[in-house]
Amino acid sequence: MRARNAQTHRRTDAQNESGPQRIAQAPSKRLIDVRGMDAYRRLLAWQHGRALAKEIYRLTAAFPREEQFGLVTQLRRAAVSVVANIAEGQARRGKAEFAHALSIALGSLAEVSALLELAVDLGYVSEAELCRVQDLRAETSRTTFGLQRTLRR
């Protein structure tokens, strides 16, 4: 009996013109994802930063144990900072705040670059690995800087 009442209720809603209109006017989950807190995922700067962070984690996994609380931590935090600042800045909604967060992300990218060069000097990273990761870092920098320039117009 209960299932039949639910079906009848659904039919009544479908026939009632005010019911579907209210539902159609409510924001959908897709709309919220595209324009809301998760919009950062669509930004190329964030996508490149995420790829860079994953590569830094992979690369630093092979560092010596004595660097676990030194260079490994510094590199990982700097790489994660890029992704986090892009996401946080986008969520702030104000152009000036977003541009400021991107500036911090660019600073973290510079830190990643300097720390990678130190890792090469110490023999933890090969020149080939450095080139590959620096290319990814450079692409992240370009897209982040381009986004920042767009915001400041």
Image (spheres, grey):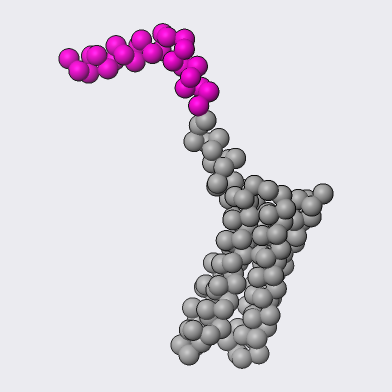
Horizontal and vertical percent for residue 110?
70, 73
> How would you classify the magenta stretch by its main secondary structure?
helix
Instruction: Look at the image and give the residue range highlighted in magenta.
Output: 1-26
Q: Nearer the viewer, residue 148 or 58?
A: 148
Magenta-colored stretch includes residue 4? yes
Residue drawn at x 59%, y 56% is: 88
Looking at the image, residue 116 lies above or below residue 53:
below
Looking at the image, residue 1 lies above or below residue 35:
above
Q: Is residue 92 left or right of residue 61?
A: right
Q: Is residue 75 left or right of residue 131?
A: left
Horizontal and vertical percent for residue 89?
63, 55
Q: Nearer the viewer, residue 17 or 52?
A: 17
Horizontal and vertical percent for residue 68?
48, 84
Magenta-colored stretch includes residue 119? no
Q: Residue furthest right?
A: 153
Q: Nearer the viewer, residue 127 or 146?
A: 146
Residue drawn at x 22%, y 18% is: 3
